[in-house]
Image (cartoon, grey):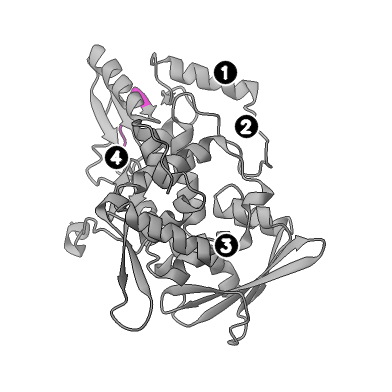
Amino acid sequence: MRSYGQFCPIARGSEVLAERWTPIILRNILLGCSTFNAIASGAPGLSRALLTRRLRELERAGVIQIRPKPRGRGSLYEPTQQGRELWGVLNALGDWAQRWMEVTPEHADPDSVLWSWCHGFLRRDRLPERRVVVRFEFDISRGRRLRLWLVLEHGEGEICSFDPGFGDDLVVEIEEPLTFARWHLGLVEWERALRAGQIRVRGARDLRRRLPTWNAGPQIHALQRAEHDRVPGGRAPAPADAGPGRGHVVPPRDIARARTESSLIEGFDGQVVTPDDPDYDEARAVWNGAIDRRPRYVARCLSPADVATALRFARDRDLRISVRSGGHGVAGTAVCDGGLVVDLSRMKGIRVDPAQATATVQAGALWGELDAATQAFDLATTGGVVSIRACRA
């Protein structure tokens, strides 16, 4: 590991992370890959000799520790506390790429996408109880096809480059690997890709229907992207069916409507709904249908800055304030008569740190969305419990 010879913290940090393949190797370790083969499987194209060298460099830097396996031959590779704290650095790099870099065919390596699904976003709680083998066939160039198998058993997934010999329960034919990568990133809807013939699935109807639900990636990536796009100065989000390089075009009528809605509260970037708007009844509705309150404003916030702006607006006008997240509170306190509702339901950002086993969640996220994000890393948290007696009361 060469030194830049500079005191600057960026230069010193780059001595560890700026080496080719090092961020990928560290990502795999932080995601739970603790053996040499598991780390290598998440880095297609990385030679074993270079992987060995990079692992030793990370050990010397104090980022990982290498120790012999308790049983058998080989070593275990685990992050130190110093290494765990680099998860935030890798996430920041990923956030930047989400906002500014397009997904191109060179980013759509089928091995990498399947590995990410299997090791980072597999919905183990939704897998069938029996073993299921899915054969993927990718058309990678001029009729040349790549075959990979995903074996799902006992709540785990394994990728094979050869036929495991159990028979194929599903066969997924993918004409364009970029489409598959964009689906995994939440940029293309599975059903739309099926209708367009870009993805074809053969096998039992029940398994065909359930297959995309075993991947939490599309939902999590879409939520993260929605959070990034709300950052001031960020680029506008691209539509789900946009191709590479296509920007998001907002019809002039929608621009005018958005400006009118947000201009009711100066400095507010979200949507303000009033009794004159067609979606007013939808905006004031909550889970308890017996609640029929009519607020003067519903401020659909997109960021903490929007929340502060809406609260300041209500305070200056002496308006009653209520706060709505999921709107499930049985007492209906999420809405108020004649006042302002601070609606957080569009603030759904979820960030999971698997190394620390923690999640940071915005106030509008629902339990199902949090479960989808955390269960991809074998993590879970408890929620509220309502007894049958309380429900009947």
Residue that label 4 marks: 291
Q: Amino acid type of disc 4?
A: Ile
Q: Residue at x 25, y 12 (%)?
A: 316
Residue that label 2 marks: 248
Is residue 295 found inside the magenta-colored segment of the image? yes
The reply to whether the C-beta atoms of the residues labelled 4 and 1 are less than 8 Å apart is no
Disc 1/disc 2 C-alpha distance (Å): 16 Å
Disc 4/disc 1 C-alpha distance (Å): 33 Å
Q: Earlier in the sequence, mark 1 or mark 2?
A: 2
Location of the C terminus (image quadrant) = bottom left
Disc 3/disc 1 C-alpha distance (Å): 48 Å
State which mark lies toward you, 3 or 2: 3
Q: Secondary structure at mark 3?
A: loop
Disc 4/disc 3 C-alpha distance (Å): 56 Å
State which mark lies toward you, 4 or 2: 2
- Answer with left or right where residue 233 lies relative to residue 10: right
Q: Give the residues in magenta.
A: 292-298
State which mark lies toward you, 3 or 1: 3
Q: Residue at x 27, y 36 (%)?
A: 334
Is residue 287 found inside the magenta-colored segment of the image? no
Q: Which mark is residue 256?
A: 1
Disc 3/disc 2 C-alpha distance (Å): 33 Å
Pick the residue in front: 12 or 64.
Answer: 12
Q: Which mark is residue 44?
A: 3
Q: Secondary structure at mark 2?
A: loop
Q: Earlier in the sequence, mark 4 or mark 1?
A: 1
Q: Secondary structure at mark 1?
A: helix
